[in-house]
Amino acid sequence: MTTRHAVILTALVAFAAAGCGGGGGGGDGRDIGSAPTNASNGNSSSGGGNIGIGVPGGGGAAGEAVFEQGVYVLTRKYCVQCHAGSGPGFPAIANPDPQTAFRAVVDNQKVNLLDPSRSRLVRRLADDKHFCWSDCNQNAADMQAAIKMWADAVVTNVPPDPNDPNAPAMIVPQGVVTSEGRTFLNAQVEDSGRFQGGMIAHWKFEEGTGTIAADTATVGPTMNLTLSGDYAWQSGGGVAFNNGIALADPNDAKKIYNEIASGSGSQEYSLEAWVIPANTTQGSVDNPARILSYGDGTNKHNFMLGQALYQYVERNRSSSLKVDADGLPAFATNADDQDLQANLQHAVLTYDQTHGRRMYVNGVSTDDQDMTAPALLVNWNPNSNFAIGKETSNNRKWVGVVKSVAIFKAALTPAQIMQNFLAGASQKFTLRFSLDTALGNGAWIQFEVSEFDAYSYLFCAPLLNAGGKSNFTLQTIRIAVNGVAPIASQSFRTLNMPITSGSQTQLSNQCQVVPKDLGADQDQFNIFFDTLGSNSLPIADIGPNPLPAPGPAKAFPGIGIRDFAEINDTMGKLTSVGVNNTTVKSTYGELVQQLPVNNDPYSFVSAQQVGIARLSLEYCDQMVENASMRSAFFPGFDFTATADVAFNTPAKRDLIINPLVDKMIGTAVPNQPTQADVGPVLNTLFDQLTSGCTAATCPATTTRNFVKAACSAVLSSGAVQIQ
């Protein structure tokens, strides 16, 4: 299966919802973007997203009273046509019933009471220009003032932890049963649980700034790496390599030779890396993008771990007469298995004198066999250098994020590899929250915490020390960030436990993903409880908004979306692949629940477009990889040419573009895009795909992949899916 080798740029035709009145400004009349977002990398106090409600329940009855005096006055006056409950807008923030409108605003996280300026109701006006009633900036300022009035009534400053003079002041809702506040600065490093025997170099990439990635292994000399070029430190650990390199000093890198390949060396090794490839379109088996390289320039390697589309590729020099100075023949994972994916992966390559090379991804062997018999490594070049992200000669770039790299002088066992996979990519900490106020001196609750990724934290295994107090109830734990208790992903919300021990009680073995707000260097955490000891302030669980009163039936639009069966039938006929193709049938079975279930365009969501795109790509792959089918669909196009030649003239491109338009969109069809509409879009797609292509980097397989991308762009577009 080679479908996923293609770069997919899908040309989508928007499904426009009916517009609402109520003033100028842009927008589609439907506030479908209600889910919170967070694009901050944690480096800016003004970044972050609207991650929660600021006060559980919006401040209860007191909060609702202030809401009715401010925010509700604005929504009822200016948003009623769409958001009263009977119109197309969601949620019903202008419902005639003020309590329903209050719950719609709070439960759908439309306000941030900790920072009113970042409330979705404010940003919708200021940034999106969504149906402003006069001047958008002034309207946003009016909404922000109303939300601030609400926040002032229900949020208060709380002094720092008296037991920790360095703790920051926290902003906590009035009356909420809460722990003292903590930040990552209060966290204690926890044993990682990794197997580290025989480790000779280890880079954790936790510095977060500067040009040096420190080697933390105890084996000398210390092999620090110097970063240069286009790279970026990542919040949560790691470095993103765009066109950058992390390069060792050759004198320091000699320890790799000494420990592994010298006369007293182990003659075996393991390479371990936590990586996030940026894409699955870089490199080839003959010319991999370099993830790790230990060699002397482009064509001489002691070892090299690289990427070739969906494959991991490794070169290893040995004393075998069948192996050259570049470590060829290479060892590669099976292309059809697509072991390499563009997400966080734990990749381990082992080499020993019994099995040769073996590859493990996410703790599991790929079962690929090294066809080159193992041999001693005594002919390694002791003067080679080590690099990450590029070749040591500063070329053959790899694009992606590296979170951790380790080199061992032994071939790790499957159990050791699984142990390190389960230990995870990020440093783990323990974070303890004082409960002195709620339970008495010495009481605390503790979590195992880590930075899960650039956008979230992981809080695991809450442990309670009751400080000698027993025979009370603990009910509902919510983890708050900067005084905000996110509504979603509260794994410990259903806890309801009798605490019978005055010492330590393990409350759960589960974990919870907690969204980042300002970043690990600034975010402050509190633990909210419904009931803790004699303290109780239950927070009402989120329930559905009351159904609006029946109104006049909504007129069904004159256009519709093909449903799941119609989409499949249409794609099968347009590509001539048919719905009974084994591969397509399997993919359709996986995606059918992700495809539209009816013809109503109002019910169409982005996840369905993703499913349509994936199915279209499968159909296009089957058509283009079949010689007779592709020749019939694209007569005259040279599929044997390299991509730099196959698409280098308008006439050659038209051999792809014209059949796609004629056979999938149709000609002289009312309300359908024409050749003049679609041609420039696909030409731009080909410009982007072929940029930088040479005969070496874009062989004939790439030509087919680019055709699949264009085919999928048309087949999954609204021009085909709207009926």
Image (cartoon, grey):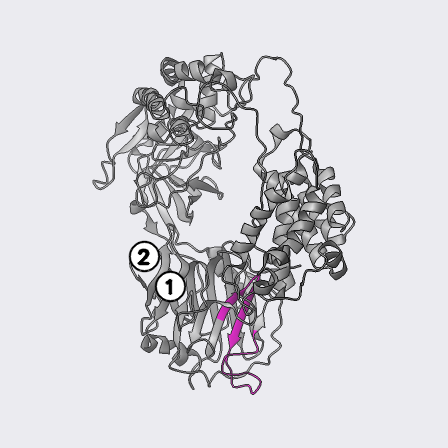
Q: Is residue 317 above or below residue 456?
A: below
Let me know if residue 312 is in the magenta part. yes
Q: Position of residue 402 (x, y in %)?
A: 43, 59
Q: Is residue 464 above or below residue 325?
A: above
Which quadrant would residue 125 be assigned to in this image?
A: top left
Q: Secondary structure at mark 1?
A: strand
Q: Position of residue 597 (x, y in %)?
A: 68, 33
Tell me the kind of residue under disc 1.
Trp
Instruction: Name the disc covering residue 207, or none.
Output: 2
Give the spatial CA distance, label 1 vs label 2. 10 Å
Q: Quadrant of the N terminus?
A: bottom right
Give the labeled residue for mark 1: 203
Marks 1 and 2 close (CB-CB < 8 Å): no
Badge 2 local density, few (<14 within 10 Å), some, or many (20+)?
some
> In the drawing, does residue 566 fall left or right of residue 216?
right
Instruction: Name the disc covering residue 387, or none.
Output: none
Q: Nearer the viewer, residue 266 or 9?
A: 9
What residue is rendered at 60% in x and 62% in y? Answer: 702
Q: Position of residue 285 (x, y in %)?
A: 57, 69
Q: Nearer the viewer, residue 453 or 290?
A: 290
Q: Position of residue 25 (x, y in %)?
A: 44, 25
The residue range painted magenta reads 305-330
Q: Nearer the viewer, residue 339 or 10?
A: 10
Tell me the kind of residue under disc 2.
Glu
What residue is rendered at 59% in x and 81% in y? Answer: 373
What residue is rendered at 66% in x and 22% in y? Answer: 556
Badge 1 local density, few (<14 within 10 Å), some, or many (20+)?
many
Regarding residue 114, the answer to whether it shows in the image is no
Q: Quadrant of the C terminus?
A: top right
